[in-house]
Amino acid sequence: MNTWALAIVNDESKSAAPLRVAIDPSALSPGDIQSMLVSLAESDIKLATLRNLMQSLNGMYANAMKYL
Amino acid sequence: MDVHPVHHAPRTWRDFFLQLLMITIGLFIALSPQTGVESLHHRHLVRDARENLREEIQNNLKRSAENIQFLEKNRQQVARSIDLLKELGGGKTIDKTLLAWGMNWNGYIDASWKTARDTGAVSYMSSEFPMPITK
C-alpha cells in the first residue's frame, strides 16, 4: 500500500514537469496540455484504485480486530 | 536425547516388556517438561503478537482515516487542475498558482505483523485470522 501510494505521489510530480519547463501556463503547447491532462487523469484513476484498496484493508483490519 | 539400553538382553517376555515400559516412562518424563515449556513459550509468543498487532492495527486505522482525507483532497485538486487545463486548452488564461496537486501520506506500519510472521506466532494462531495485504 505504501509503495503504491508513493508511486502515485511520484507520478503526480512528473505530471507537473511541462509546467515547470514552460514556467507560465500560457506558454504550454497544446501537446503539453494534452500530456498533462492524460497524466492527471491516470493519477485520478490510480487514486481511486488506491482508495478502494484502502477500504479493503480497513475491512481486513476490522476483521482482525474482532479476532484479536 | 540419548537412550541407553540395558547391558543384558531380555531373557523373558516379562523382562522385555518391563524394559520397554521403563524406556517409555523415561522418555515420557524427559519429553513432558520440554513440551510444556515449548507450549508455554508459544502461548506467550501468540499473546505478545496479538497485543502488538492490536496496537499496530489501531495505529494504522488512524493513519488510514488521515490518508483517505489526504487522498480525497488530492483528487479534488487533480479534478480542479484537469478543468483548468481544459480551459487553458480552450484559450482561457489561468493563474499558475491554481494549478496545484500533491498528496501527503502517512505510511502504514507493519513491524508487528512482520515480527509475528517471522517468529512463527502467526502459525500458532487460528487459521481464521485474516492475513493482511503486505504489499
Image (cartoon, helix red, strand yellow):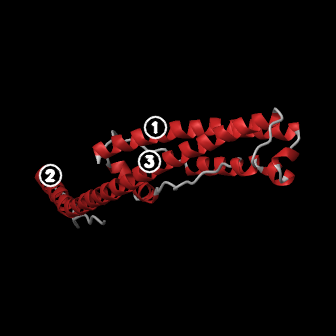
Q: Nearer the viewer, residue B84 or A54?
A: B84
Place residue B41 in its image quadrant: bottom left
Q: Judging from the image, what secondary structure is the residue with disc 1 in? A: helix
Camera-near label (3 vs 1) is 3
Image-based side of B99 in relation to B27, left or right:
right
Q: Which residue carries the number 1 mark?
A: A56
Tags 3 and 2 on a common chain: yes
Q: Nearer the viewer, residue B130 or A17?
A: A17
Disc 2 and disc 1: Cα gap in Å? Answer: 62 Å
Camera-near label (2 vs 1) is 1
Q: Which residue carries the number 3 mark?
A: B65
Going by the numbered disc 3, the residue's amino acid type is Ala
Residue B78 in the image: state x and y as whole percent: 65, 41
Give the answer, above or below, for where A53 lies relative to B1: above
Residue at (89, 41) in percent of width and height: A29
Q: Which residue carries the number 2 mark?
A: B17
Which residue appears farthest toward the top when viewing the image?
A: B90
Chain of the residue on which disc 2 is drawn: B
Tags 3 and 1 on a common chain: no
Camera-near label (3 vs 2) is 3
Image-based side of A67 in relation to A22, left or right:
left
